[in-house]
Amino acid sequence: MRHLAALSLGLALVLPIAPAAQAEGGSITVTGEATVQATPDMATIMLGVTTDGETAAAAMKANNEAVTAVIARLTEAGIEERDLQTSNLSLNPNWVGYDSGAMPTIAGYSAMNMLNVRVRDLSKLGVLLDASITDGANTLNGITFELATPRPVMDEARKMAVADALARAELLATAAGETLGAVLSISEVPNYSSPMPMFRADSAAAGAVPVASGQIGLMASVTVTYELAD
């Protein structure tokens, strides 16, 4: 009996163990993408005032007066307080004398105040730009067009991205002689890009600044893993 037990134990020790993964079917992972174009209904303009003065106080005083006038005009045109935000405020000396080799000196000061202005009525955008420039805004850093409610457009892009992933997976599976099975996992790929605005300002301040809002594209990307059926 001891010999039989020893023999059985020895057999148990040398029996091979098959990897569990070998008994499972394969899988395929694809990425689907889709972009949905939409007409923007809102915009954010980045404008401001830059002023110079012999002293820091003079430069800032002139800047404050000009910015106050710009804000008053924007408020009068219907821009709410919640849609006005200071994005940058600076006061710097103007150094001169570097080229002459002498000790640099300060020749006045420059003050700058930048505002982010959200415009919820795009029909007023050109007029607002012209009015702001007339009242003292002399710095324009661009325009970003947006959607007030982007979720429905993004959801449509997500649906199309999933459909794109399915089409790609079916194509690849068929080409490999396999049959596509159930979804094993699905995840959305973060999209860090921003819609590119379309902007042109090729007229003088005599009339409303012409602005073309065009369309913006919202992109969705998903990664899906499918089972390959036996």
Image (cartoon, rainbow, N blue to C red):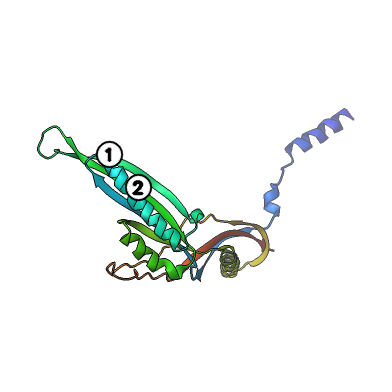
Q: Residue 207 has which mark?
A: none
Name the secondary structure under disc 2.
helix
Left or right relative to 133: residue 17: right
**Front-most of residues 128 and 29:** 128
Left or right relative to 144: residue 15: right
User: Would residue 45 be visible to someone looking at this image?
Assistant: no
| Residue 3 percent coordinates (x, y) | 85, 30
Residue type highlighted by circle 2: Asn
The quarter of the picture where the N terminus appears is top right
| Residue 64 percent coordinates (x, y) | 35, 47
Label 1 belongs to which residue?
56
Tell me what residue is drawn at x 35 percent, y 63 percent.
131
Residue at the far left in the pictured view:
100
Residue 157 image-quadrant placement: bottom right
**Front-most of residues 190 and 115:** 115
Label 2 belongs to which residue?
64
